[in-house]
Amino acid sequence: MEIRKDRVVSIDYSLRDDTGRLIDSSEGAEPLVYLHGNENIIPGLEKELEGKNPGESIACSIAPENAYGDRDEALVFKVQKKDFGENAEVAPGMQFEAHGENGVQIVTVVKIDGEDVTLDANHPLAGETLHFDVKVVDVREATSEELEHGHVHGDHGEECDDDCDCEGDCDCDEGCCN
Ligand code: ZN
């Protein structure tokens, strides 16, 4: 069965940056399972996978505009160390999740200068060209419930609870609370 919109796709993948550094990989873990054509993964990779069948492998490079976008320097800003609370440990390179108007954002601590803490709310992969090696493991039809929700259910034996209000803290992996 070939990959097309509204089918559930399982892939093994590895992701490297321009320097060849490994950023992410499914090796040693379960394949990534997603609902094709529903913005579950970056658009550039969906386009490359369209029409592929289980067993096929692809290698592709995705420019920032088809991945996590270009960097926006307006998203680099300063806060005060005390904003993190008493005795909070803050160090360059630390990342945390912030809940903003655009949903959950990953914010990175860039540098600390006395009481000034510089933060960067760009996606960590913004501005990066992404190099993927992908092998298609499985393709199946989505259930009507999956199509309704716009994400995959059940591959980990978990029930999706669309009404859950855990704000992304649960580990059901189904994307229902993100
Ligand atoms: Zn769901």
Image (spheres, rainbow, N blue to C red):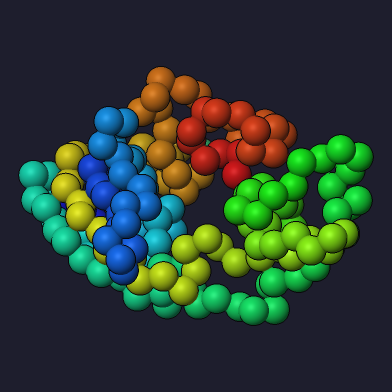
Residue at left offset 69%, top offset 32%:
166
**Nearest the eye: 112 or 72:** 112
The percent coordinates of residue 102 (x first, y second) are 67, 62
The residue nearer to you, when weighing 34 against 28, is 28
Q: Position of residue 164 (x, y in %)?
A: 67, 31
Residue 123 visible in this rendered orientation of the protein: yes
Asked if residue 17 lies left or right of residue 163, the reply is left
Q: Is residue 8 visible?
A: no
- Left or right of 23 on screen, residue 73: right
Q: Is residue 173 above or below residue 7?
A: above
How far across and down, in percent of the image, does residue 140 sit?
23, 40
Q: Where 173 sits versus 97, above or below?
A: above
Residue at image location 61% in from the left, 78% down from the top? 72
The image quadrant of residue 55 is top left
Residue visible at 40% across and 56% down?
41
Q: Give the residue at the far front of this rendering.
A: 114
